[in-house]
Amino acid sequence: MKLQIIRNTCPRNCYGTCGILSYVDNGKLIKVTGDPNHGFNQGRLCAKGYAYTQYVYHPDRLKFPMIQKPRGSGNWTRISWDEAYTIIANKMIELNQRYGSNLALGYNKFSGNLGILHYATEGMFNSLGPHTKTFGNPCAQTGRLAIKNSFGDNYSSVPENMANASLIVIWGSNPAVTNVHQMKFIYEARRKGAKLVVIDPIYTETAKKADLYIQIKPGTDMWLALGIAKILIESGKYEEGFIEKQALGWDAFKTFLEKNLTITEVIEKTGIPLKAIEELTSLYYSIKPTVTWIGLGLQRSHFGKSGIEAINSLAAMTGNLSIPNGGLYFVHFDVEQFPLTLLNHRGPDHPAIPYSREIDISDFSESALSLQNPPLKLLWIASRNIVSQDQNLKAWEELNKQMELIVTVDLFMTKTAEQSDIVLPAASHFEEEDLHVGYWHYWLSINQKAIPPFYEAKSDLTIARELTTKLNELSPGFSNFPADKEPIDWIKEELTPEMMELYNIESYKDLLEGPHQKKKSNIFWEQEEQIRLLSPEKIAEGEQFHDALAKENEFPYQLLTPQKLLKIHSQYEMNPWLHSGDQEMMIEISDDIARSHNLQDKMKVEVFNEHGMITGRVRINKLLPKNIVLAPQAGHDPINQLIYVKNENDQSESSVFFYDSRVKIRKWGEAHV
């Protein structure tokens, strides 16, 4: 067979959503490269992308459906797909008969694969009628609501335009690790003379490349932004014309900063010296165009939302929102402009239950435990590794005990799969069709099926179609999922005339020739639109919470868990090209913590709080703030065992506040001496 070159799209939860060219010889994937027609990654991939050939054929990939008896025992037995479907379908039908509805059936699915056709899981459950479903976004909900409060809608500038900025201020993001393709646009801007500022508690790989690095205390970004705004107001160096026409709440904002905030307070709260604040203030006002990049890490504390709104307000004051090559960067949610036919599939009505039962994915375990009439009894897990990534694991343990059936769909035997009754082998994106739009850039791309499935792996859509068939065989009319529709049918439904016009295509076949960018006239923030400035009431709320948290002394160290270069959460951690063996976790601590506990490099330590304990080896980081403990995500002994999040506010108002977690540290075994 002739060598084939096929278009794929990386579906990982990453800024890139990169275009891929896959080289296939006799049905085997032999090489991958970046697609040069994709305007964001421009023919390049990250290390994880180039390792896909090993990822796809990894010997530890799940090959067949398996059942475990009893749950958690490790006693796995291979079963056929028909046996798996029969067990699952019978349990669904029995629970329906027991409780008179499908509310005892639920799923927990998020971002392990961001393809639009992976909404087949939600579509499959919708086809059953009212059930238990998730809502929310554990990664970006806080920032999304902050952007919406400020601008009324989506707002994130075109990434490629950053190459023409004169000042780039990166606030709580580390693109040299988490968004490597954006770095080429940053480097291009710097070659043209642009300055780079990085604001981060950690001296990151991106910070090492900056002209100005500002080390800020975690969670105090609001005060830095407000401090700069105060200096601009007092010196009269702000865009009066813009403020008069487009800024809502200006008088209250200005009066509060003039009368209720001092630069001394800003210095005390942020830990930033006056000279650095003044330097950043001067840059913000004197240089145009300036872009401000708000990272996802910034929102992972109780005052992250107010911090983002304060930064939005600062960007507006300096007149950089609507000028060419200026603007603000967060992420966008353009995927919601598509019909999302699978996600929005309407199931049959129930005579007594008008809607599905919804619980916030950010507080799933505790919320699910509180459900009654009926309790949750069947849980379907897809595109997630809960045990390595979620929080409140003790509540998850309790929830698992009440489950009568847990089904996990994945490519590998993850820690979550190990705690399931049935695991189903998932297809990789090289083994299925899909459609993709990023949440950072504005390119639409298709994913073609490049190779046959790995052993008996199946896509989420195939599983939904086949399980529906089994359900209706055992109980006619149980599901109304359109099992006869092929992947291309679903793709065509997403490409409505409006969406094709927006992306300048005439049919899906245009995407087979290369990705297409959204028309830029539909991206830019319009000059006549308004921004709502951060209110004094929200500033006061943030201050009260900050002061309360500062008094917390029982667990003196703040735990930060940023992403790593060669993993995305727990994804890729099994790939030997990227990771050698079962490496012990490295716990980074400051000189101050090391001295306080008489610790040295490579010593074995325990990091703990009231929720759990993990072990690792010390790595002393002389540039780490004195009260910070830095640990990677996932791994053999996942750090999320220490993270408990109970939000006193409405859960729909926030992402998970990982970075409010606090810990202690001690030498390994010290507690038992």
Image (cartoon, rainbow, N blue to C red):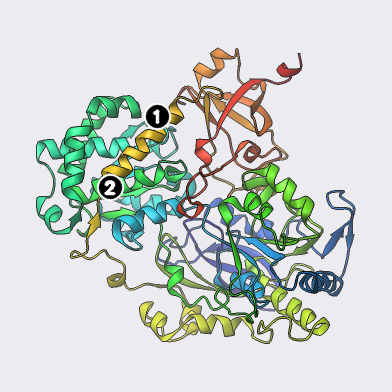
> What's the amino acid at mark 2?
Leu
Q: Which mark is drawn over residue 534?
A: 2
Image position of 529 (left or right of 120): left
Placement of 643 over or under 179, stated as above or below: above
Looking at the image, which is closer to me, 166 or 101? 101
Q: Is residue 565 above or below residue 106?
A: above
Residue type at mark 1 is: Asp
Whole-percent x, y for residue 458 in the image: 72, 71
Is the residue marked by circle 2 packed among few (<14), some (14-19), or many (20+) residues within 10 Å? many
Q: CA distance from mark 1 to mark 2?
A: 19 Å
Residue placed at 54% from the left, 44% from the top? 565
Which sits in the foreground, 32 or 164? Answer: 164
Disc 1 is placed on an element classified as helix
The quadrant holding residue 242 is: bottom left
Q: Quadrant of the C terminus?
A: top right
Where is residue 300 shown, x and y percent of the image? 47, 43
Asked whether, in this view, residue 37 is left or right of residue 108, the answer is: left
Q: Secondary structure at mark 2?
A: loop
Quarter in which the N terminus is drawn: bottom right
Q: Specify the label residue 547 is tagged with.
A: 1
Tell me how many marks there are.
2
Mark 1, other Cα within 10 Å: few <14 / some 14–19 / many ≥20: few
Which of the labelled discs sits on residue 344, or is there none? none
Residue appearing at x 85%, y 70% in the figure: 87
The image quadrant of residue 235 is top left
Viewer can see residue 612: yes
Where residue 277 sits in the image (x, y, percent)? 25, 31
